[in-house]
Amino acid sequence: MSDLDVLRTLRDQIVPPPLDVLRETARRRARRSNALGVLAASAAVVALAATTVVVAGDDADRSPLPIQPPEPSSRPLTYADGAVVHYGDRTVDAAGPVVELDLTDQGVAFRTADGRIWFTDGASVDELGALGEPGPVFTDDTWPPLVHDGWLVSAHSGSTVAWFEFRRLGVAEVVVYDTAAGAFVNRTDVALDDGGAFPGAVTDRYVYWFGDTGPDADDIPDVRYDPGTGEQVPVSPEQIQDDLRSQGAPRTILIGSGGPLRVTDGTDRNFSIEGGRVTPQGEQPLTAEDGLTGKRFAFDAPPDYPRQVAAYLTQWLDDQTIVLVSARAGGDDLIVCRVDTRACEVVNSGPSSLVLPEVG
């Protein structure tokens, strides 16, 4: 069964939203004009053109939809090279250079250099919105150290993607979209303090963002948003940890240094490839355990791989498989490592301009 068939099967297993919501979604989609060309080849190469903008109104789009629990799934290796999105063995032609992308179980959300935000399942492309003009308060120093500079957020399983839009200069709005239902869950103005804000994480129940920003800010989100109610409240690291633990152990790493272990998806870690081993780095003495098995989160390096100190976790393909990006002279290596066997292999080498999930 192909990746696309698997995705369609998962989509069919999801309980549909209420009939009146589907009707409203259908009416919105009927107003779109899609320009799409599909080429069938042995490599399943798909060339896709842009579609028109879905304009989010102030009525039905603001009505919250229930977020369904994510089904276990696998995701294909995904990255963008210029204006081409590589989604497993399929390629999608974007409307311009891709500067950011994130994954859901149904496909890829991505932002092009002109600020427009799109979603593709590998067989069609929808334009969902546009970033707009963040304003002068959102500079390169808005993001804390070690936090990816980006506006899209999603989890390593599930159908939800969220982002910020600025339909007025400097006025942020959080937008939550369910890629399984093909519908907006909610959108709400973001209460900004004196500084900026930007998205940080998504779980089954909430969207988190950074309200405290800047080079001296903590690298843990501090605002929690409930798409079901539109409520946004300050949140503590302990409350975020409680939410993350409620998601279950797969696709997590337990990290600690002399204290309680905290749950992370691993994308806040840099990895060292040295002496034939691949290990997470951090404050010493570092404990890094696989959240699923409790075993040490470490791997055997690809055979004869040179020492590299700049490797980052960019994607979970499934509960047992991660993808690391290792920066080398002249380009990047994508390295797949298996949690169950501890084996790693280089699966792709490309230019350093590749755009990857989580790390940009």
Image: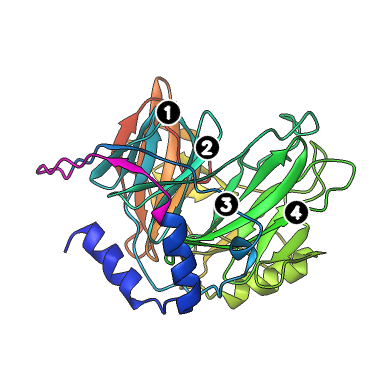
The residue depicted at 69 percent of the width and 74 percent of the height is 242
In this view, the residue farthest toward the left is 42
Look at mark 1 in the image and give the residue it sits on.
Answer: 96
Please state the extent of the stretch shown in magenta in the rendering: 30-44
In the rendered structure, are the residues bearing label 1 and label 2 in contact, judged by CB atoms less than 8 Å apart? yes
Mark 4 element type: strand
Q: Residues within 10 Å of mark 1 (few under 14, many from 20)?
A: some
Cα–Cα gap, marks 3 and 4: 17 Å
Prevailing secondary structure class for the magenta stretch in the rendered image:
loop
Q: Which amino acid does label 4 sit on?
A: Asp
Name the front one of labels 2 and 3: 2
Q: Which of marks 2 and 3 is nearer the N terminus?
A: 2
Mark 2 element type: strand
Cα–Cα gap, marks 1 and 2: 9 Å
Cα–Cα gap, marks 2 and 3: 15 Å
Mark 3 element type: strand
The residue depicted at 83 percent of the width and 48 percent of the height is 192
Where residue 92 sits in the image (x, y, percent)?
A: 31, 39
The image quarter containing residue 171 is top right
- Assess whether residue 70 is covered by the magenta stretch: no
- Assess whether residue 40 is covered by the magenta stretch: yes
In this rendering, position of residue 84 left or right of residue 225: left
Look at mark 3 in the image and give the residue it sits on.
Answer: 153
Look at mark 4 in the image and give the residue it sits on.
Answer: 189
Residue 286 shows in the view: no
Q: Which amino acid does label 2 sit on?
A: Arg
Look at mark 2 in the image and give the residue it sits on.
Answer: 116
Q: Which of marks 4 and 2 is nearer the N terminus?
A: 2
In this rendering, position of residue 309 left or right of residue 51: right
Q: Which of marks 1 and 2 is nearer the N terminus?
A: 1
